[in-house]
Amino acid sequence: MSTWSQPVPPPASAPRRVVIDRIVDSILTSGCRGRVCSDGLTAAGKTSLGHELALGVAAGPGHVSGFP
């Protein structure tokens, strides 16, 4: 088992922040528990997107927990 983990991405640009905020708002206002999936090619930014969404959701209202 590796102990390496993907570094947290640098702060998003203003246009990317707008998109991230819209996705986070959609997640937080959906009214149900759910999962978010991202699909794409290697090095497309899926993990960076996940980190950015996690930070936004964690800053929002409600309880956020990991999954097993």
Image (tube, rainbow, N blue to C red):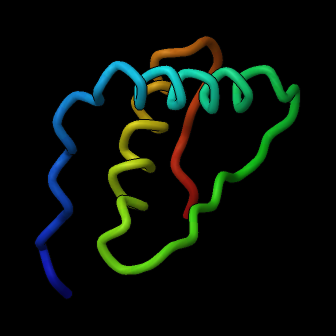
Q: Nearer the viewer, residue 15 or 9?
A: 15
Q: Name which residue lies at 37% across and 44% down.
A: 51
Q: Name which residue lies at 37% across and 67% down.
A: 44
The extreme bottom residue here reads 1
Q: Quadrant of residue 57?
A: top right
Q: Name which residue lies at 80% across and 40% down.
A: 33
The extreme front residue here reads 15
Q: Quadrant of residue 6?
A: bottom left
Q: In the rendering, at what x and y percent does residue 13 appear?
A: 29, 26
The extreme right residue here reads 31
Q: Nearer the viewer, residue 15 or 55?
A: 15
Q: Name which residue lies at 52% across and 49% down.
A: 66
20 with respect to 10 (left or right): right
Name above or below for residue 26 compared with residue 50: above
Q: In the rendering, at what x and y percent does residue 5 appear?
A: 18, 64
18 with respect to 14 (left or right): right
Q: In the rendering, at what x and y percent does residue 54 appear?
A: 45, 37
- Specify the quadrant that holds the N terminus: bottom left
Name above or below for residue 23 compared with residue 2: above
- Specify the quadrant that holds the C terminus: bottom right
59 with respect to 64 (left or right): left
Name above or below for residue 22 compared with residue 65: above
Q: In the rendering, at what x and y percent does residue 60 appear?
A: 55, 15
Q: Nearer the viewer, residue 31 or 46?
A: 46
The tally of labels here is: 0
